Amino acid sequence: MASPERKVLVLGCGAMAYELLRVVESNHLEAVEVTCLPASYHNRPSLIPQAVEDRIIEARGRYDEIFVAYGDCGTGGMLDTVLERHGVERLAGAHCYEFLAGASLFEHLHESEPTTFYLTDFLVRNFDHLVWKGLGLDRWPQLLSDYFGNYTRVVYLAQTDDPALTARAEDAASRLGLGFERILVGYGEMEPAIVAAATS
């Protein structure tokens, strides 16, 4: 358990906000504060490094430790450049699918079927807004083959064992015309990384 004197800031992605809060709560990390950047930044990954740096600078002097709960997330190494400049660590991996599934499992999934579209609990809950309407498929259904014609399956990397979410994920795969597989991964490598950052 983190000591009351050692304050830790976990700076994460809005798409992982619920999961980060659950990790902190379930591990009784009372000295950890979670703050998140908008999930919409994933549509423009170039915004992530500067936004993270701004938050790090703003937080300096108020916390004993800052940990960034992002993968590279499409920044092409730009996020790592920022973090190296400030001596801040982040979650290992290229993106949330990798650190949620775990590096070994994700590598196996990717190598066995690279034409996989991944979903998380957040993406299942927000599928209509982010994917169906976000890509304009509600207005131009003919674009479905342009976007997803090269995919063969959906893999739902589930954080929770929720039958309702599983049904929604399966429905999403059906709407995309893809096969479906669900793997209950929980919080994967994210949980031990957050706990280690908070208690080391």
Image: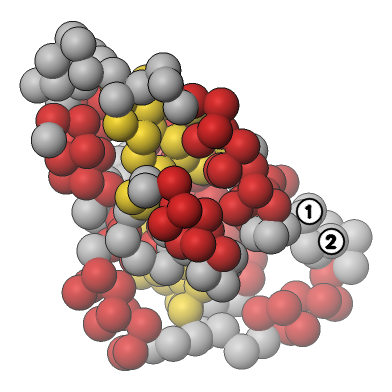
Would you place residue 198 above or below residue 69 in this image? Answer: above
- Numbered badge on residue 133: 1
Q: Disc 1, disc 2: CB below 8 Å? A: yes
Image position, residue 163 (x, y; %): 34, 43
Tell which of 167 and 88 is nearer to you: 88
Quadrant position of the N terminus in the picture: top left
Image position, residue 4 (x, y; %): 18, 9
Tell which of 12 and 148 is nearer to you: 12
Would you place residue 183 above or below residue 176 in this image? Answer: above
Tell which of 95 and 53 is nearer to you: 53
Kind of residue indicated by mark 2: Gly
Residue visible at 46% across and 39% down? 12
Would you place residue 130 above or below residue 6 in this image? Answer: below
117 relative position to 63: left or right: right
**Figure label count:** 2
Q: Judge the density around disc 1: few (<14), some (14-19), many (≥20) Cα neighbours within 10 Å.
A: few
Kind of residue indicated by mark 1: Lys
Query: Is there any visible trace of residue 168 in the rendered image?
Result: no
Measured in 3D between alpha carbons, the distance from the residue under mark 1 to the one under mark 2, in whole angstroms, is: 5 Å
94 relative position to 138: left or right: left
Image position, residue 200 (x, y; %): 12, 35
Residue visible at 24% across and 64% down? 102
Residue visible at 74% across and 83% down? 145
In which quadrant of the rendered view does residue 107 lie? bottom left
Q: Judge the density around disc 2: few (<14), some (14-19), many (≥20) Cα neighbours within 10 Å.
A: some
Identify the residue under disc 2: 136
In what element is the residue under mark 1?
loop
181 relative position to 197: left or right: right
Query: Is there any visible trace of residue 148 in the rendered image?
Result: yes
Image position, residue 31 (x, y; %): 25, 16
In which quadrant of the rendered view does residue 172 lie? bottom right
Residue visible at 46% across and 61% down? 80
